[in-house]
Amino acid sequence: MQNRTDSTRFFRHNSPEPFTPQNVQFMKIYLDNCALQRPLDDKLQTRIRLEAEAILCILEQCNAGVIDLISSETLEWESEQNPLDIRREYGESALESAKFYVVVSDEIEHRGARVC
């Protein structure tokens, strides 16, 4: 995973004291392809609508630099495999704001093979 280059962004503050580098925790988030695609799903069910709104709020915070989105080689590959143009393009667009990128290493491939 790439290292953070801008240490001025923060999200969580665990102290009643004013913000300082010592009392701030940085937040990174990895959304799988199912979560990324949720805003494009049919929102007739309340649960689906609320999940879609939550994902859009998270992506908004990522675009604003409040939360760091993590992408990966696997996530990009999954998005590219989507047969629907609108979903494929949306997935690619959502991942553009990612600040970190995880490359599939031999270690990750071996771990995946052991799990399957």
Image (cartoon, helix red, strand yellow):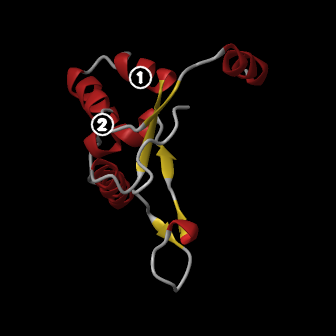
**Residue 72 to residue 21: above or below:** above
Q: In which quadrant of the rendered view does residue 66 lie?
A: bottom left
At 35% from the left and 43% from the top, the residue drawn is: 38
Dot 2: element: helix
Residue identified by numbered label 2: 94
Q: Quadrant of the C terminus?
A: top right
Gap in angstroms between the C-alphas marked 2 and 1 = 11 Å
User: Which of 24/35 is in front?
Assistant: 24
Label 2 environment density (alpha carbons within 10 Å; few <14, some 14–19, many ≥20): some
As shown in the figure, which amino acid type bears the numbered disc 1? Glu
Q: Are marks 2 and 1 in contact (CB under 8 Å)?
A: no
Dot 1: element: helix
Give coordinates of residue 75: x percent, y percent.
46, 26
Give coordinates of residue 51: x percent, y percent.
38, 55
**Residue 22 to residue 107: above or below:** below
At 41% from the left and 22% from the top, the residue drawn is: 76
As shown in the figure, which amino acid type bears the numbered disc 2? Ala
Give coordinates of residue 55: x percent, y percent.
36, 51
Residue identified by numbered label 1: 76
**Residue 41 to residue 90: above or below:** below
**Which comes before the other along the chain, label 2 or label 1?**
1
Q: Residue furthest left?
A: 86
User: Which of 3/91 is in front?
Assistant: 3
Q: Residue furthest right?
A: 114
